[in-house]
Image (cartoon, grey):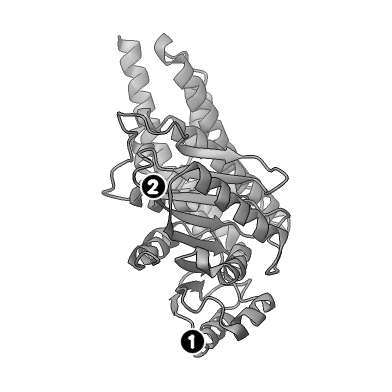
Amino acid sequence: MAHDEGYAATVATIDREVAEFIRAFEALQENLRFGAVADSQATLVAAAGGTFRRIEREFIPTVPPPDQAEFHARFSAALTELGKACNLFMTAPSRDWTVAFLYSRRAFCTGLYALYELRASLPQIDANFLMAGAEAPVAPKVAGDGAPTGFIQRKRNDARSDYTLYIPEDYSPARPLGLIVALHGGYGQGSEYIWTWLRPARSRGYAILSPKSLGNTWEMETRSADSQSVLAMLDEVGREYAIDPARVYLSGLSDGGIFTYILGLAHHELFRGIAPVAGALHLAVDPMLREGHGKDTPIFVVHGVHDYIFPVTFTRQTCQLLTQLGYNVTYEELPDWGHALPYSINERLVAPWFDTLPAKS
């Protein structure tokens, strides 16, 4: 009994420490500036300290109580991935550091997927998957139509690319879901970018569709293979789940923001609103703007003053142009942000803006 209690106490301590690390690491990814990597690394050291070295040395080799053996193995595997993410992030700054960051991001998300499956046993980590004050979606006592919920990974086929889907665990075909289509940035992965949307979507009862581009980034044309791929995904998800066609929203980061303009204006009838984040207006949309495509679709533009990829002056001009052309544009300029992952931006800005839009008639 004492061994069981000691193991439970250790798990509770790690639960708390890792929950704090997850939030800190998300904040670092959101506020990352590649010219100040050393500062971000110092912040990570202060946040994580020797947490993962201690876990690797002391917790993972522990012999758990017999009834906790499977949990221990799965928890240890998740913690190993988070430790790997931390170590890769701490790679010495150089011209190649961005590659280490991409691998760090991949390990971090791999660890999150594993922790999500263990959330019932990890209350502090579980709380990270919800906004403050929100209640977790719970599977109904009476089973629905048997369609899977939670995270669903779909492999590429002849009609479309890979995509990751999140369906709230309380899904019922009797209550059609709003759907957020979330487009990753260049060299990104839908399976990773979806994590920037999980907390607000899960808290508000939205499904998330996070596609993978067919190439390293999106094909910036109105009639592209990527457009057809995303449309095929929407059709597929709509056949399997009850999705409210009046509450389908589109948002993307960086190159995904560029593609949000292209896809959102070309197929404006599908989307209640579009929200490019840290993106830019591409020449491919010029013919559509001249013809007034999508003027009835609200656009929410979010951009950081310190964006080193797409200068904020260009985005200001873009919003001015769209407004002059009669488009319904709301612009949010962030004085302290650059060009990084938008965890809190999606949570406190984009998702609430989606909520303000009445259902498409």
Determine whether 229 is above or below 83 in the image.
below
- Identify the residue shown where x is 44% and y is 66%: 272
Disc 2 from disc 1: Cα separation = 34 Å
Give neighbour class at mark 1: few <14, some 14-19, many 20+ (Cα, 10 Å). few
| In this rendering, position of residue 219 left or right of residue 55 | right
Determine whether 50 is above or below 342 in the image.
above
- Identify the residue shown where x is 70% and y is 69%: 221
Q: Is residue 338 visible?
A: no
User: The disc labelled 2 sits on which kind of residue?
Assistant: Arg
- Labels 2, 1: front one: 1
Instruction: Please state the total of marks drawn on the protein image.
Output: 2
| In this rendering, position of residue 175 left or right of residue 109 | left
The quadrant in which residue 81 appears is: top right
- Identify the residue shown where x is 67% and y is 58%: 228
Q: Estimate the x, y position of residue 260 in percent, counting from the top left.
A: 57, 66
User: The disc labelled 1 sits on which kind of residue?
Assistant: Gly
Give neighbour class at mark 2: few <14, some 14-19, many 20+ (Cα, 10 Å). many
The residue sitting at the left extreme is 133
| In this rendering, position of residue 290 left or right of residue 249 | right
Determine whether 132 is above or below 3 in the image.
below
- Identify the residue shown where x is 68% and y is 78%: 283
Q: Nearer the viewer, residue 113 or 157?
A: 157
Q: Nearer the viewer, residue 302 or 339?
A: 302
Q: Which residue is mark 1?
A: 326
Q: Nearer the viewer, residue 303 or 156?
A: 156
User: In the structure shown, which secondary structural element does the residue marked by tag 2 occupy?
Assistant: helix
Q: Nearer the viewer, residue 75 or 193?
A: 193
Q: Which residue is mark 2?
A: 202
Question: Which comes before the other along the chain, label 2 or label 1?
Answer: 2
On the rendered image, what quadrant is the N terminus found in? top left
